Image: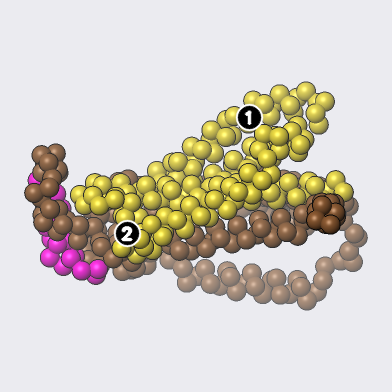
Chain colours: A brown, B yellow
Amino acid sequence: MDSVFPVDLLLLALVVVIGVATIRARDLLASTLLLGVYSLLMALVWTNMFAMDVAFTEAAVGAGISTVLLLGTLIVVGREERPSRGPHGAALLVTILTGAALLYGTTDMPAFGDPNAPVHTDAVGRKYIAQEVGKVHPVAHHHDDTHHDEAHHDGADHSADDHEPDTSAPAEHHGGSSEIHGDPAQDAHHGDYGTHVPNLVTAVLAAYRGYDTMFETAVIFTAGVCLIVLLRDRRSPPKETEAAA
Amino acid sequence: MRDQVVPRVIARMLIPYMLVYGFYVASHGELGPGGGFQAGVILAAALILHSLVHGLEETQRGVPRRWVDRTMAFGVLLYIGVGIHGLLAGNAFLDYSSLALGATDPESIHGAEAMGMTLVETGVTLTVAAVMVTLFDKFATAARR
């Protein structure tokens, strides 16, 4: 049992308490603020799991922006919740079943920090880290080019070439095509874009999953456009028609 | 809230740091935790704090609504533009190594890839910040009616 475990236990217990309190609170303002506390506690839990990017997002989005937006909603819908008649039986059952299924699913997951977890041993995971997936010209291919174009390079580039072959030479033999070389020791040299991008999360989000991130951005943009269209100032259209007429 | 001294002074102290921190997160997303999305949210939070304390009109005097709308579109266009630049350079869509502009040494290639990610993350930052500001703007306007 590691020393962080009691802290995690305390945090998770607090998360449960806050979660229940959020539902129980009749005052919606209190509920909103409790949700912010919930997000901050979850951010601490993610931090304990070394998931810094997740913790960061949770703190910025969950505790920050969401709270402000929910407060904005409260101004529109009012502060008091309508009185409800006790817990809904079927909804409670579905919730408990879903929770049980999720908990059952976690039993199949590798232990936290397990070095033999699939993410570390699986070929796809290694390609993630090697960051060579989907490139027409992998970096190894460009090493070939440097030798062809050597006449155009000046002295500074020669010195770079001089120490390159010991890392790149094995890759050139089987890395000239767009095929990924699977040797993890070899991948380590190309990983993290030559130490330009040490944060693997950003590297995966922006490179390996570049399309995903692009369309996520497009979705956010679409949401913004929908907002402008749906919630535009209704007083302005008559003015425009007057101007047109 | 304009006549309350404490929120006004606190906001005046916080907003510059929030903006700087937002830009820091945006530009260092590849080095530490964070990235475009978080940076956009932090930048938007700074503007929202400003409009909470000084009122929506005051914020929109400095950051006009039409510029927010343009920023929203520009972020997505920047992202897609980097992708199309890859296509025009004869590589795959979103192949950041095309940003090396013909240089073939590994250092330039890696640098170009990092630059491509930074550009793309900047696009995400701008779009997210603009959408969040719009979201608050619309809610606040709807609440006032």
The reply to whether dot 1 and dot 2 touch (C-beta < 8 Å) is no
Check residue B34 in the rendering and tell me which mark sits there, or answer none: none
- Label 2 neighbourhood size at 10 Å, few (<14), some (14-19), many (20+)? some
> Residue B133 location, x and y as percent?
67, 46
Query: Which of the two residues, B140 or B72, is positioned nearer the viewer here?
Result: B72
Q: Amino acid at mark 1?
A: Leu
**Residue at mark 2: chain:** B
Disc 1 on helix, strand or loop? helix
Please name the residue shown 69% across and 71% down the image. A96
Does the magenta segment cover residue B63?
no
> Residue A242 location, x and y as percent?
85, 54
Say which quarter of the image contains residue A113. Answer: bottom left
Residue to which mark 2 is pinned: B89
Q: Is residue B81 at all visible to an observer of this figure?
A: yes
Query: Which of the two residues, A8 or A170, is positioned nearer the viewer here?
Result: A170
Residue to which mark 1 is pinned: B14
Please name the residue shown 74% across and 56% down the image. A20
The residue at the far front in this view is: A245
Q: Earlier in the sequence, mark 1 or mark 2?
A: 1
> Residue A150 location, x and y as percent?
10, 50
Find the magenta span and give its range. A161-179
Could you tell whether A44 is left or right of A233 in the image?
left
